Amino acid sequence: MNAPTQHAQRSAYYEAIARQRLTPLWESLHNLVPKQPCPKAQPAIWKYAQVRDLVMQAGAVISAEEAVRRVLVLENPGLPGKSSMTPSLYAGLQLILPGEIAPSHRHTQSALRFIVEGQGAWTAVDGERTTMHPGDFIITPSWTWHDHGNRSIEEGGEPVVWLDGLDIPLVASLDAGFAENYPQATQPVSRHEGDSFARFGHNMAPVRHRVTDPTSPIFSYPYERSREALDALYRNGELDAWDGVKLRYVNPATGGWPMPTMATFMQFLPAGFAGRSYQSTDATVYCVVEGRGTVHIGESEFAFDAHDVFVAPSWQPVRLFASQDSVLFSYSDRPVLAALNLLREQRN
Amino acid sequence: MNAPTQHAQRSAYYEAIARQRLTPLWESLHNLVPKQPCPKAQPAIWKYAQVRDLVMQAGAVISAEEAVRRVLVLENPGLPGKSSMTPSLYAGLQLILPGEIAPSHRHTQSALRFIVEGQGAWTAVDGERTTMHPGDFIITPSWTWHDHGNRSIEEGGEPVVWLDGLDIPLVASLDAGFAENYPQATQPVSRHEGDSFARFGHNMAPVRHRVTDPTSPIFSYPYERSREALDALYRNGELDAWDGVKLRYVNPATGGWPMPTMATFMQFLPAGFAGRSYQSTDATVYCVVEGRGTVHIGESEFAFDAHDVFVAPSWQPVRLFASQDSVLFSYSDRPVLAALNLLREQRN
Amino acid sequence: MNAPTQHAQRSAYYEAIARQRLTPLWESLHNLVPKQPCPKAQPAIWKYAQVRDLVMQAGAVISAEEAVRRVLVLENPGLPGKSSMTPSLYAGLQLILPGEIAPSHRHTQSALRFIVEGQGAWTAVDGERTTMHPGDFIITPSWTWHDHGNRSIEEGGEPVVWLDGLDIPLVASLDAGFAENYPQATQPVSRHEGDSFARFGHNMAPVRHRVTDPTSPIFSYPYERSREALDALYRNGELDAWDGVKLRYVNPATGGWPMPTMATFMQFLPAGFAGRSYQSTDATVYCVVEGRGTVHIGESEFAFDAHDVFVAPSWQPVRLFASQDSVLFSYSDRPVLAALNLLREQRN
Amino acid sequence: MNAPTQHAQRSAYYEAIARQRLTPLWESLHNLVPKQPCPKAQPAIWKYAQVRDLVMQAGAVISAEEAVRRVLVLENPGLPGKSSMTPSLYAGLQLILPGEIAPSHRHTQSALRFIVEGQGAWTAVDGERTTMHPGDFIITPSWTWHDHGNRSIEEGGEPVVWLDGLDIPLVASLDAGFAENYPQATQPVSRHEGDSFARFGHNMAPVRHRVTDPTSPIFSYPYERSREALDALYRNGELDAWDGVKLRYVNPATGGWPMPTMATFMQFLPAGFAGRSYQSTDATVYCVVEGRGTVHIGESEFAFDAHDVFVAPSWQPVRLFASQDSVLFSYSDRPVLAALNLLREQRN
């Protein structure tokens, strides 16, 4: 058959099958089954120096109560209109002013809070309030009632900003989102602050506790301890050529991730660190806790300072350089890839 | 502040933050965190009587070798242009003619084959060929070399059609797709047919085998046995008001799913069965093996006959009715939802 | 201090501490913490040709009902008075005559039955009866009601002999034995024969089944299938220099052992097989199904024929030789050692 | 048959089968399969006031180096000559004087150290030394090199006494003991003190760590933290009617037990606590850290003071009473019973 005839025949055939909601795989196979990941998400950075004023102005634009959550969403430029940082992950900067309440609700999306600046705010989960300090990592797991609040100015409350990390795009792509508002603005406090940490945070556990879900029973991982661990290891001589000193947060009841959809990490890079390149199929959002340096992500290069947020999409080579002692918090969809046997890593 | 002023102020603010790739969560929160799943995928059915001729015509339109995989993709009308049945799952009807080869490749996407009609074809996985018979469920797991072929007409080969089920959209949404072609059209045969089944299929296992991945070590689940199991249970009086007699396929090395991203099921509905309604966050693709009946999915109602394919999106209530003794094969993304603690089910 | 003085001083001290129920570790350390296992159990064999008549005579000595279980216990000569084959395991030959009942009871000890000879007997577990055929492996798990019976002579019943394997010494050493008699001689039959196998035996499982204990949900592993698996592998060229062709029985709901305290195996040795030596910390009881050969265990050497039973204590090197095609069933305490991280193996 | 005839017949038969190393199960069934546990181990207490002088005198009787381990074994009066506290567990009081070394070795037996009194000693495990303080719980897992030492008097060393808990009887009963001496008295120190705790003790873990065995990667569980956890829970109002406030020690890499054969617990009983009775198939050894009270175990009643050691055999009802605020450390073979599905508990 000559080519024009074949083309005409195929076009007619494609029209015929389209009426039955059928398409020819052979025309799209290469896109559907690519040789390697081709993420639409782009490497990007948000400089805190440029966005901080806008975050604070949000306090005048809308109240925490009206907003329910007063958050500026960091939207990946490669995923316009999707309120997404990566195909799985969401990131936003939330502001809560002294005396405000972000009302109680719950949803099947898992959420993490990484405190950027300010003192006096709290997060309540399952009846227990946790005070938030810069550098703390706090979780509000799937389907747990949670609300946030801040002390009044009289009590020493300051504007508090944190990074919200959620699996909103993932849950949307699985059509698995449910949400519910609590009848009151705040849920009742039924347990003392620190209660869950006393039960599970000290390498011990209640004698009759049974693990029934994959979520961490502690809600707060204080920066004080994370930093102490990193410092001790660095003093002991630990320094990986790719990672510096890097720990992952752990669900102490299982040794697994704190939540089933998002991994979280904290790493220390000493001044002068020039990391080697690695790549992984989990996409990662970083938040700089302290320090200054540079990151290469694929073809992009970004200078980073404290409180900046940047993103490395799937399979983009990442290299980290520190000009000052630096601490980076990060989160990714690694547990999802690991659970589905789709995690692939390469150290270059 | 009066409303027009507030509106103007907010618009100006939204423009300012957009320049920093920031968006106001409070304008989109309800869409991002819905009260319950609102799938774009629609209930739909493909009547085999209407598509069979088109499938067979594909044999004249393109060769198996040129196509690599000669498949008509069943595209959900709610997901146009996405080659998807649900946000996670792909379905297609593949045709292989006598004497043809579908060349060997591998990819991180997991694939299942459910044989619809025809005798004589085989699938090779990891050096072992399996003959395909109607009703057999066959897997080609993530990153395993696999190819398909068919006996020549002289050897008794017939056109063989099967349903392909893959996790293509899921892997795409995670930017985790890798693929590779085998240097030759077919991989060498290094093991006798039935070898993996002899090792693992009889409730026994090689004495020194260690489980290192979540994938089933058997590649073929013959219809003969599945049907025998369903029949025995029905004779014994088993009949669930929602499911009839329903079994899931099992990885005999773990008791888990045959592959980490897709669950597969087979169920028997006796003539006259009128199932009660249930809904679940896993989306399910059904393929009718035998029989005739009706299915209600959400607001839709479809009559089904042997070899028809239909789809129930997430959280749509499903009711099954059988006018004849019927057997349904189905697959869903249940392992994904279960692994991520996002599986929710309701029997109404 | 001179030696006699020291000796006297120590003796006085030892008497003083003995009054407080204290003993000096340093006098017994080498025995308590040996360089390697020094089992008291000895290699031994029971020739079926020598014991069969005695087993049959037991039928005249006592009724099954009076005996509760009419069993001759195989007692390891190194463990006199302990009714034990190894420190963990018990073995006995049970006889049930046509028309007899071994009354229903349950206990925390796990039991296996390996059928040696005869047709017509059944075992009932949890309301389901299983017919016993030579070579079948049948379990009566911990705390399940179980009874045995045999067809009458009129119905074709024959004297049936099987090997009982239990973890009696292990459970005794843990002070964890509980037992209870059923109010009637036999429990009611509530499920058809083959029901549990239909649910779980075909690499499928009921869709809503949840695994809540480590015990296999199938009670019978028919010889027909085990033999088919071994034969297929041998035809395919499988032959391990130590094991021949060796499979372990599997709990299809988990991939683990059928019961949490005893592993079970079946292996095929072709005529002329001369196995290499291996040793392991699990002690193993063998029962010859078919064939003839020789086994070396430590310093001992035994010729074996069909139905003979022999035992290899912990860490004794074992070598198997077959003069005819042979099939060996075996059971050991491997799951115990594996669960406690005490399993050590060596292939010499 | 009349009774004398039957008796004679049976006796003759028993003699005949004895020659084949066979015994009649029906004569011993009730003992082998008891209605409920009948432990030979007895409830017992060792009053520290009565044994402390003897422990200290051991320092003059033998050197740590000659003894290898200078330990007085607490031998259960119901298990004479067995150096055992329970059928599974061993307990001993070890003394190390200033300047002494207990030389390095390893064995498959798992060991725990619970520090009773004295400052200045250390335990080394896998190249890392841990300073021992009263109330600390320290592990030397199976097959890890370990040695102990004490500072010189000049450096402030004091006689240090700790309770050793091992699974010696269990490992003996499984014929699974291996042991080896290190070529030098002490193993080289290759890691800073606190290194493993920095890696795993703070609800974090090294990012690339893979769990490959069931043993805790932290060697020391300091009393300071355990006590802080108990105190916080008691202040929060936690008080169980059976247990008071009771936590178990956890392997932070898995959430499981620190070692696969022994569970460890610490509990707080406020002054005036009168616990309800419970019983369990795990046998438990208690060591009083602080306080004073009474314990009922089966038919026995013991007054306890700080540093006393007492034992509750399997299934003996236990009731705890505190006349002062009391803290009890305890260990048991619970992981063994749990792994083998033999754990049974009852709260009366």
Image (cartoon, coloured by chain):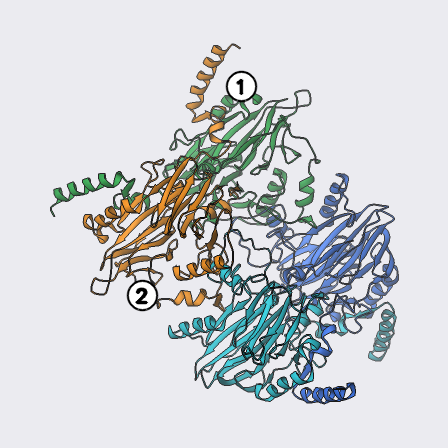
Chain colours: A orange, B green, C blue, D cyan
Q: Is residue A177 above or below residue D157?
A: above
The image shows residue C188 at horizontal and vertical percentages of 62, 61
Which quadrant holds the N terminus of chain D?
A: bottom right
Circle 1 — which element? loop
Q: Is residue B172 left or right of residue C282?
A: left
Instruction: Single out the mark in the foreground, 2 or 1.
Output: 2
**Closest to the observer, D190 or D280:** D190
Residue at mark 2 to residue at mark 1: CA–CA distance: 67 Å
Neighbourhood count class around disc 1 (C-alpha, 10 Å): few under 14, some 14–19, many 20 upward: some
* Residue D316 appears anywhere in the view: yes
Circle 2 sits on which residue? A189
Q: Is residue D171 left or right of residue A160?
A: right
Circle 1 sits on which residue? B62
Q: Is residue B185 above or below residue A93?
A: above
Residue type at tag 2? Val
* Residue C155 appears anywhere in the view: no
Verify CB contact (< 8 Å) between mark 2 and mark 1.
Answer: no
Neighbourhood count class around disc 2 (C-alpha, 10 Å): few under 14, some 14–19, many 20 upward: few
Residue type at tag 1? Ile
Q: Is residue B308 left or right of residue B202?
A: left
Circle 2 — which element? loop
Q: Chain of mark 1?
A: B
The extreme left residue here reads B2
The image shows residue B117 at horizontal and vertical percentages of 58, 29
The image shows residue A112 at horizontal and vertical percentages of 37, 53
